[in-house]
Image (cartoon, coloured by chain):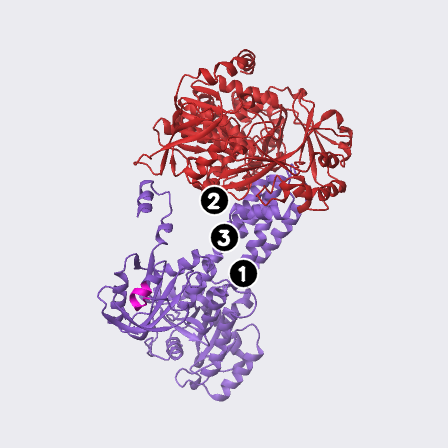
Chain colours: A purple, B red
């Protein structure tokens, strides 16, 4: 208490965290609601005291990381609260790096409340704030920043592929990639700094700067390449945006209902039934998909419908993948004319391609769904399919009947492979960028490196500032880099003698 | 001003030693007592006195006040920034450097004005004389020759944090105590110092001087319970100039036009043509052989006390980076000195081997040694026990500065000394302590690093330590610190403040005048030489206050646009920002 008073008198000179970390925190770590077993976690210096008081351990603590069945009692009233498992983790060998304990109790709300209240009644023990366990683990160096983010994603992962990506990130693979860049950037900076601080007195060759030039260029190229992954990792993390678009009454809402296997959108034979965007999330082959149904595209005098069409077009522009639904009974009866017809139709549905993207890229982002195939004679359908296989420049097309589910299997296979390509395989190749935050810092890092080249021959202090800035931005992902670390590299790599 | 200084020196130097010392000391109570007369102590005493505190400086030997114990130079990359900042706060070392310098150069001139390093080789005698005469002419400052035996402490003021309060000191001669509100300790390498040469060890902080008594060290460790560590440093042998074959070394000329350290000075005492050169030579494989043969005779090098990585002895350089050629600078010790200082050859082996080692270098093949090199090990107080005002957290009124805080270098010591003196004075005058931010000064970076991170090796300033390096330039130290030093801190005299304000206003005026001139880019290029400008028909310059990187261009001075004529002096501190 004396220390705290002393800090208060002196104002804010001592970071409050130092005071907080002396406290012991607890929280229900399993989910809320009725369940078989609930886990309550305790972390901090008083953890052993908590364990002794609550589990009636008067003598020795249980051996670390071993489950022990105990009667769990209220420390004040000695009333029996529950029987459950207790575990003891002696710091630093715990998640937070501090002394920790776990109570595995029965999951009824009354039991949980009683145990939490009993914990709160102990001196020096308080409920944890959101994310506090992880924050302590981070401060103790148990987790890197990217690992913390990976852990957050793992807890929120809903699909199998998301889980794999999060696990990979938590494993530190993304962290390792960024750390490697960080390390190389640190060396670049150390060598520039050595040249600035010591070249007047010491033998530091001009060649050092040329090496830095090429290292910086190489790093720039690698980060740029990483940034050009077309958002695969982020897409996997937050879901692939798939938009159903097309003319009115083509069966867009039926497709949505078929895919999500429930009547999520109202369907009717009346054109223009769907006016706003209907969204639903799906798990397609382990990948998260955010599916939206949009208003049918047509010119309308109804202002509400016009707004719906505007939103639909906007959604198509932002989509990762567009499913263009066509009523196959509207196709030209002569199969040879179908490709040209579809080409024409696509240009009315899709936004005009930007010059650099070209048609090729656009067709990767589109699937044609030829709906109502049950209303087309089988022979005509087969001939049309043949024509479509022959033609080039068109996105893949699938005949499908939402009414009979004919062709659904084939369509799902095509859809799944598209979604998988868009997300990338989370287990192969270089780890992907998973967070928009990382992207922003990496982009700024590359920008800063450009500053290095800009000032390299004019003002080395400003050029070094570019490398410092790049490292700061990377540090926002991997953790801060201090001046001492740079000096360590300088003195390891050079003989500084003056 | 320089002439006036000389006058003071001639007339008062001797009387200063006799009249102000020892027995006829009348006062027994001061605001501030400074212990130690090195770079930290002199700046501390002068700063406290400038602030208005009645100050006493106690030193073992008055004649060594302002002595340059190691290299005869001041400034450099990072260190030059510190000198400029100390000067901007009205400290001594910048003006002393201008008075004593015999070889001026701006290092890093090709690397951007933020990392320029003003540096000078000094005449040891002149430096000492300047500092001594300056202290003499400082009002409210008394100098006393003596050795401190004990620090007096009492119960703390309960209103303030801390376990003790300093009340004064007691001298070795056992006489009555001298009382004060604050004490600044700047004992350098003398705190439990021991000297090393070959296999012999003797107590002391500098060769030729008596060791400090153990009492002070005991008070700090036992009474105040301060955590103390041990560091080491060393100094090279001094070589007789006549015995050196300088034709075998490379001549290093000074800048043609010396740049003064001090913002008050327009020129240095040493005329451009009177400057002395330095010489550069290199070690040979023979040097490495001698080092290897001497290792078993060298107890300093075998100790595991932390020495600096950047100022290592020739022994540790050779052992850590074998098979390389290392640079050796031969520096003048002064205008009249017959000695050369071999920068880079600090060594602690036995004297006969030192001579053998030197003679392995071609230019030194007949070298004679005047005084051999030696090593020093000394106690330092872990500086994380200090506040940003350099006061010991546990002891009200006790301030530490210089090597006692684990730093190395004259400039680092001077910077801390000044700031400790400021705060010791403020404490004595019942003013709240002040801190300098690392965003605004290298002094702030230095102190923040010390008290926030502590040291594991002697701490030296590098520009890479400053996060805000591009702003903390040596050329703008006056604009950054002088107004604040006068208005808030109180350590800047009116004369300097007025000068800084007029410079600041002049710069603003020149900046506006310059920006009002619109010429075609072709015409600008005629005036400014090869400068990148946008190709508009008529364009004004984008400028900022900085070093005269562009406008210092001599062509410009010949074609100054008319509105600028009256502020030409200021224009040299304005920089045109290149367009990209």
Q: Which residue is mark 1?
A: A176
Residues at marks 2 and 1 on the same chain: no
Dot 3 falls on which chain?
A
Q: CA distance from mark 2 to mark 3?
A: 20 Å
Q: CA distance from mark 2 to mark 1?
A: 27 Å
Quarter of the image with the C terminus of chain B is: top right
B197 to the left or right of A119: right
Residues at marks 2 and 3 on the same chain: no
Q: Are marks 2 and 1 in contact (CB under 8 Å)?
A: no
Dot 1 falls on which chain?
A
Q: Is residue B468 shown above or below A224?
A: above
Q: Local crowd at mark 1 within 10 Å, few (<14), some, or many (≥20)?
A: some
Q: CA distance from mark 1 to mark 3?
A: 13 Å
Q: Secondary structure at mark 3?
A: helix
Across and down, in percent, residue B254 comes to 66, 27
Q: Secondary structure at mark 1?
A: helix
Residue A20 among those drawn in magenta: no
Dot 2 falls on which chain?
B
A299 to the left or right of B90: left
Residue placed most toward the observer, B117 or A25:
A25
Q: Which residue is mark 2?
A: B453
Q: Secondary structure at mark 2?
A: helix
Span of residues in magenta: A50-58
Q: Which residue is mark 3?
A: A475
Residue A52 among those drawn in magenta: yes
Residue placed most toward the observer, B171 or B63:
B171
Label 2 or label 1, whichever lies nearer to me, is: 2
Residue placed most toward the observer, B414 or B294:
B294
Q: Local crowd at mark 2 within 10 Å, few (<14), some, or many (≥20)?
A: few
């Amino acid at each position: 208490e004396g220390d705290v008073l002393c800090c208060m008198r002196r104002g804010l000179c001592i970071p409050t965290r130092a005071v907080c970390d002396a406290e012991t925190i607890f929280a229900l770590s399993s989910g809320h609601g009725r369940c078989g077993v609930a886990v309550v976690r305790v972390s901090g210096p008083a953890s052993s005291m908590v364990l002794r008081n609550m589990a009636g351990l008067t003598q020795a603590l249980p051996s670390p990381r071993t489950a022990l069945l105990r009667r769990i009692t209220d420390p004040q009233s000695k009333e029996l609260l529950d029987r459950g498992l207790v575990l003891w983790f002696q710091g630093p060998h715990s998640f937070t790096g501090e002394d920790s304990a776990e109570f595995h109790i029965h999951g009824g709300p009354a039991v949980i409340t009683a145990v939490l209240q009993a914990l709160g009644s102990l001196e020096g023990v308080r409920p944890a704030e959101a994310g506090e366990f992880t924050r302590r683990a981070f401060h103790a160096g148990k987790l890197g920043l990217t690992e913390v983010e990976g852990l957050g994603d793992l807890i929120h992962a809903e699909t199998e592929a998301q889980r794999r990506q999060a696990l990979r990130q938590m494993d530190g693979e993304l962290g390792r990639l960024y750390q490697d860049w960080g390390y190389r950037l640190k060396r670049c900076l150390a060598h520039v700094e050595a040249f600035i601080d010591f070249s007047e007195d010491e033998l530091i060759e001009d060649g050092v700067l040329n090496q830095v030039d090429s290292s910086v260029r190489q790093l720039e190229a690698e980060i740029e390449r990483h940034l050009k992954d077309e958002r695969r990792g982020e897409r996997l993390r937050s879901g692939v945006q798939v938009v159903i678009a097309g003319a009115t009454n083509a069966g867009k809402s039926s497709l949505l209902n078929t895919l999500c296997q429930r009547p999520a959108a109202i369907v009717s034979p009346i054109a223009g039934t769907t006016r706003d965007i209907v969204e639903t999330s799906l798990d397609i082959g382990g990948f998260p998909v955010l599916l939206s149904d949009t208003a049918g595209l047509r010119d309308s005098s109804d202002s509400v419908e016009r707004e719906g069409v505007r939103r639909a077009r906007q959604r198509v522009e932002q989509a990762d993948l567009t499913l263009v639904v066509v009523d196959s009974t509207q196709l030209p009866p002569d199969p040879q004319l179908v490709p040209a017809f579809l080409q024409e139709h696509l240009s009315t549905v899709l936004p005009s391609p930007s010059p650099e993207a070209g048609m090729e890229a656009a067709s990767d982002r589109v699937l044609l769904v030829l709906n109502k195939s049950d209303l087309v004679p089988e022979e005509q359908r087969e001939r049309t399919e043949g024509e479509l296989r022959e033609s080039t420049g068109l996105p893949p097309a699938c005949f499908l009947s939402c009414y009979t589910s004919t062709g659904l299997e084939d369509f799902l296979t095509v859809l799944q492979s598209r979604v998988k390509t868009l997300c990338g395989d989370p287990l192969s190749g270089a780890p992907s960028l998973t967070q928009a935050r990382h992207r922003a810092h990496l982009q700024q890092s590359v920008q800063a490196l450009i500053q290095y080249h800009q000032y390299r021959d004019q003002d080395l202090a400003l050029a070094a500032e570019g490398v410092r800035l790049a490292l700061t931005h990377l540090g926002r992902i991997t953790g801060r880099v201090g001046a001492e670390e740079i000096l360590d590299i300088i003195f390891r790599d050079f003989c500084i003698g003056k | 001003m320089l002439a006036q200084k000389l006058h003071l020196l001639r007339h008062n130097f001797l009387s200063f030693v006799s009249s102000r010392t020892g027995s006829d000391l009348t006062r027994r109570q001061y605001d501030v007592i400074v212990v130690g007369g090195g770079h930290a102590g002199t700046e501390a005493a002068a700063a406290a006195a400038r602030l208005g505190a009645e100050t006493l400086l106690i030193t073992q030997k008055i004649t060594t006040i302002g002595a340059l114990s190691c290299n005869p130079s001041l400034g450099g990359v990072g260190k030059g920034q510190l000198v400029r900042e100390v000067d901007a706060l009205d400290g001594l070392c910048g003006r002393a450097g201008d008075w004593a310098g015999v070889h001026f150069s701006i290092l890093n001139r090709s690397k951007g004005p933020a990392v320029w390093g003003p540096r000078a080789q000094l005449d040891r005698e002149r430096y000492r004389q300047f500092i001594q005469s300056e202290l003499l002419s400082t009002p409210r400052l008394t100098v006393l020759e003596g050795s401190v035996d004990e620090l007096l402490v009492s119960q703390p003021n309960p209103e303030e944090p801390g376990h003790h309060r300093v009340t004064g000191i007691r001298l070795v001669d056992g006489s009555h105590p001298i009382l004060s509100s604050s004490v600044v300790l700047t004992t350098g390498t003398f705190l439990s110092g021991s000297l090393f040469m070959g296999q012999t060890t003797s107590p002391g902080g500098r060769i030729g001087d008596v060791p400090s008594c153990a009492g002070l060290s005991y008070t700090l460790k036992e009474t105040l319970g301060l955590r103390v560590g041990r560091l080491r440093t060393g100094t090279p042998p001094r070589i007789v100039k006549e015995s050196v074959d300088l034709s075998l070394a490379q001549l290093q000329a000074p800048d043609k036009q010396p740049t003064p350290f001090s913002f008050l000075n327009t020129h240095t005492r040493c005329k451009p043509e009177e400057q002395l050169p330095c010489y550069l030579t290199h070690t040979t494989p023979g040097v490495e052989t001698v080092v290897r043969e001497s290792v078993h005779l060298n107890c300093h090098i075998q100790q595991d006390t932390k020495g600096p990585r950047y100022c290592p002895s020739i022994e540790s350089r050779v052992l850590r980076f074998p098979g390389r050629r290392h640079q050796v600078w031969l520096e003048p010790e002064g205008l009249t000195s017959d000695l050369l200082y071999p920068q880079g050859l600090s060594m602690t082996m036995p004297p006969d081997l030192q001579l053998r080692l030197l003679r392995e270098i071609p230019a030194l093949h007949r070298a004679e040694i005047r005084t051999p090199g030696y090593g020093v090990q000394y106690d330092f107080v872990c500086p994380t026990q200090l506040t940003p005002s350099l006061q010991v957290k546990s002891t009200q009124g006790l301030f530490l500065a210089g090597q006692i805080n684990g730093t190395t270098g004259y400039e680092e010591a001077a910077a801390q000394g000044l700031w400790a003196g400021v705060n010791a004075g403020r404490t004595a005058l019942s003013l709240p302590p002040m801190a300098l931010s690392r965003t605004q000064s290298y002094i702030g970076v230095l102190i923040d690093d010390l008290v926030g991170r502590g040291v594991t090796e002697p701490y030296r300033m590098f520009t890479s330590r400053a996060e805000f390096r591009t702003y903390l330039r040596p050329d703008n130290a006056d604009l950054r610190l002088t107004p604040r030093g006068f208005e808030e801190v109180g350590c800047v005299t009116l004369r300097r403040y007025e000068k800084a304000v007029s410079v600041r206003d002049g710069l603003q005026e020149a900046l506006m005048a310059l920006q009002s001139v619109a010429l075609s880019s072709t015409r600008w290029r005629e005036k400014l030489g090869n400068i990148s400008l946008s190709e508009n028909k008529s364009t004004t310059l984008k400028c900022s206050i900085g070093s005269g990187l562009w406008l210092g261009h001599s062509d410009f001075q010949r074609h100054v646009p008319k509105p600028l004529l009256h502020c030409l002096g200021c224009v040299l501190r304005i920089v045109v920002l290149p367009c990209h």
